[in-house]
Image (cartoon, grey):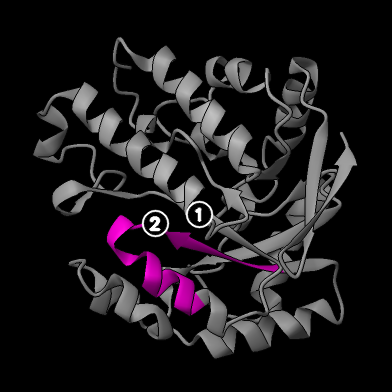
Amino acid sequence: MILDYHMHLEKGEFTKEWWEEFYRRELENGIEEVGISEHGHRFIEARYIYKHLPYTEKWCDSSLERYIGFMEELKDIYNVKIGIEMDYFPEKEDEIREFLKNYSVFDYVLGSVHWLNCGFGFDIDPNDPRWSNNLEEIFTDYFDRVKKAINSGLFDIIAHLDLIKLWGVPLPENIDSIYREVARVIADSGIVLEINTSGLRRPVKEIYPSPRFLEVLSKYDIPITFGSDAHLPEDAGKFIRDAYELVKSLGFKRLAVFNKRRPEFLPL
């Protein structure tokens, strides 16, 4: 099965017409099962989780109930899963857990890291002066948060594992030891690894995790899923078939599909 569990409708409205633009492109790309995973920071109901960020008022302005209702309407017609992507903040674990407990409708929850110490949203601006800081410290902070997210038990899937590289910055000298440690944490946790193709549309021009990182991860029996991380219809399902062939060639064997946050593992 070829699937895409990571896309966002946030640049349009929750309408069947907007959704169908994505869905048509998914079908053209040979995708057999699709999931929508709106950002948690989009919703008013999650504002208390994100209130420490400078963009809260701008971002948290949509109704989660409207999203859920729309998705349930789609599920009556299409083979589509209801997901959500939640940012991980170490100091907000209790709030995230409470939020997810209150909304049990999701088929899966993506966990991701977009924010570092001191409110550094590293994927917002490549010219942010904080990128001139010690890159090893930035990468260490990022992957420390990723490991905490994995071990938190809050999430079903860890999304775009090495997103920190998106601007094409040089990798620190200790990157291989970081890769090995993160791979062990994933394997021990049982979390599902997302193969995210959106990096091919970024300056770094490679998938998340990178082929180099995937070689390390392939030494463990880690289940995977796929995501295009599309925010526009033209990106829906893009590069996923190529990513599928890559991970299969590296020896990954298990694909995870989800229903009500329960995984089923299929052979790749």
Q: Quadrant of the C terminus?
A: top right
Q: Residues within 10 Å of mark 1 (few under 14, many from 20)?
A: many
Residues at marks 2 and 1, CA–CA distance in whole angstroms: 6 Å
Work out whether residue 138 or residue 236 is closer to the camera in this orientation and state it. 138
For the residue labelled by badge 2, is the local secondary structure a helix, a strand or a loop? loop
Q: Position of residue 108 (x, y in %)?
A: 66, 63
Instruction: Specify the amino acid type for callout 1.
Output: Gly
Q: What percent of the width, then of the height, locates residue 265?
A: 85, 46
* Marks 2 and 1 in Cβ contact (< 8 Å): yes
Residue 109 location, quadrant: bottom right
- Look at mark 2 in the image and give the residue it sits on: 88
Residues drawn in magenta: 82-99
Up the image or down, 164 lies above or below 6; here it is above
Secondary structure beneath dot 1 equals strand
Q: Amino acid at mark 2?
A: Tyr
Residue that mark 1 sits on: 111
**Which residue is outermost to the front?**
188
Q: Residue at x 68, y 17 (%)?
A: 219
